[in-house]
Image (cartoon, rainbow, N blue to C red):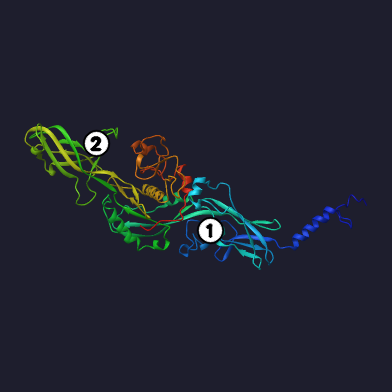
Amino acid sequence: MSATKYKHTGTAYTNPFENLERAEVRIKAGSARIARIVFLNGDRDETNTVKQLVNLGRSDNFVDGKVVPSVDRAGAKVRLKVYFNKPGSHRFTVKCEPLDGNSKYSPGELARNSRFGYQKEQKSYTTAGDGSLILPLDDFYVGAAGKDKYVFHATDENGITVSTGNLEVHRLIYYVEIKMRSLTTCATNLELMERTYAKHNIKLARLPAVEMDFLPNIGMRDAEIFQENARRAYSRSSALGKQPQVIAIAYTGHLAIKKENFQVGASPVVVGPGSSPVLIPVGDPPSAKSLFPVTYFLWQGLVPGENWFVSAKFIKTGGNQTSAVDIPAEKCKPVPSTSAIPQRANMVRIDVSSLQQGTGTIVLVVNVVERMRAGLSFRGGNLICVCTKAWWTPVDIKTQNEIVVHEIGHSIGMVPDGSGKLPDRLTSYYDDAKGHVGNHCFYGLPANQNRYDSPSDVIRSKCVMYGSANGVSDFCINCAPAVRKVDLSEGWRAF
């Protein structure tokens, strides 16, 4: 037979390469080697992808067996266990690897907040006598950014490496609704709000709602009593067991701000028997501050017992205040801007036929609505407020959801200005100096405007974090990365 034909059959003279290969196999087969590295999930191993709720404290208070299956899924620290295939003390190393697509933090962000980083350094260990080891809890942690993914690799002295499944970073916020008794305009669901935040790996988990005392309107002077009423209701809720990761959402009717003793007038006017009624618009003429007239609506139908009318006087031409003639309130009638909403009046019709014949000026002093707010985020606590009525009409469910998205946005640090532990300031950021109270986003508008609060700005804005309700329910391409990057680990103090 030809030796060439059977060169791989094996003889007493096997070649050196084949001997070396077989020796190596014998060495590996005879030594201990690393077998697995797994996430711990309570009392069991987890080899698949896990969702790590990094903003939660490591507390059994959050464990529900579903969203939070065990305390090991709460917090940024990761509990790992390594197994070898044989008992004994075996040395190995572990390293955390971030996957492609994770958020990128700037040097400034990392310097401001250590929670933006993860455990980069490799660590060395030796197993216990049974050939396994649970790694110290404080040794490995992941960053704060939602949607980020990590994998952990363990390598033994023979160079064999095993890996975990993926760890996905999620955030969990509980919310409790506080509804005023007899208020029938509250949103029946906040599903749009929940879906919006879920896109950014923030789960909003609803707790059972509670009730508070009714208030017809929350103005500047009503904030304290409103918070006190809401606080009493909150103290009876299940939210107490989930602090500090709870946001309280209180519903109100109107959030109208009163402008008192606003003066308007008309001149010259003819008064006396047979004279036509005088129609007076309620507003400000164009000015250096506003190129367009500003219309106000009379303060009526908002708070029982509070009236729009203050006074009306007729001053005859050539006369002065001392000779002014009072015009009774019953001679002054609001004129609605639309018959569908009688309370929405921006003009006053004054009957002057009972006055003495003459020509002069009418001075009308009224209380008006300076502005209507869609919602509020109270600083220093976990309370936000959403109005369910605006301009005397109910606010639809979609808009209420958009308002809650916006106000929770403020609670989580939107729009960041680069201070404290926040992400860097956004290019579309603006603050009080350019419009609305607080930090907001002008995405969709030019970057060089002096202000961002005109009616046309509302229409053109393209982010839910614009300073007023604009029909947008999601974060823009500038804000979305910051929502993903924010650190929510501190939660909120109960209001």
Q: Which residue lies at the image location 13% right of the left edge and 41% below the top edge?
A: 331
- Expressed as whole percent of the image width and height from the top left, the position of residue 131 reads 66, 66
Count of number-bearing discs? 2
Give the left or right position of residue 140, taking residue 420 as reference. right
| Screen quadrant of the C terminus | bottom left
Is residue 325 visible to us here? Answer: yes
Give the left or right position of residue 238, taking residue 99 as reference. left
Determine the image quadrant of residue 86: bottom right
Q: Gap between marks 1 and 2, in whole Å?
A: 59 Å
Determine the image quadrant of residue 333: top left
Amino acid type assigned to the residue bearing label 2 in the image: Asp
Q: Residues within 10 Å of mark 1 (few under 14, many from 20)?
A: many
| 99, 120: nearer the viewer | 120
Residue furthest right as drawn: 1
Q: Residues within 10 Å of mark 2 (few under 14, many from 20)?
A: some
**Considering the numbered disc 1 on the image, is that residue within a helix, a strand or a loop?**
loop
Find disc 2 in the rendering and name its residue. Answer: 284
Amino acid type assigned to the residue bearing label 1 in the image: Lys
Find disc 1 in the rendering and name its residue. Answer: 77
Is residue 354 visible to us here? Answer: no
Q: Which residue lies at the image location 34% right of the left edge and 39% below the top edge?
A: 453
Determine the image quadrant of residue 263: top left
Residue furthest bottom as drawn: 129
**Considering the numbered disc 2 on the image, is that residue within a helix, a strand or a loop?**
strand
Residue furthest front as drawn: 111
Which of the two labelled residues, at mark 1 and mark 2, occupies the earlier sequence position? 1
- Expressed as whole percent of the image width and height from the top left, the position of residue 337 reads 24, 39
| 476, 393: nearer the viewer | 476
- Expressed as whole percent of the image width and height from the top left, the position of residue 116 reads 51, 51
Label ID, residue 89? none
- Expressed as whole percent of the image width and height from the top left, the position of residue 396 reads 35, 48
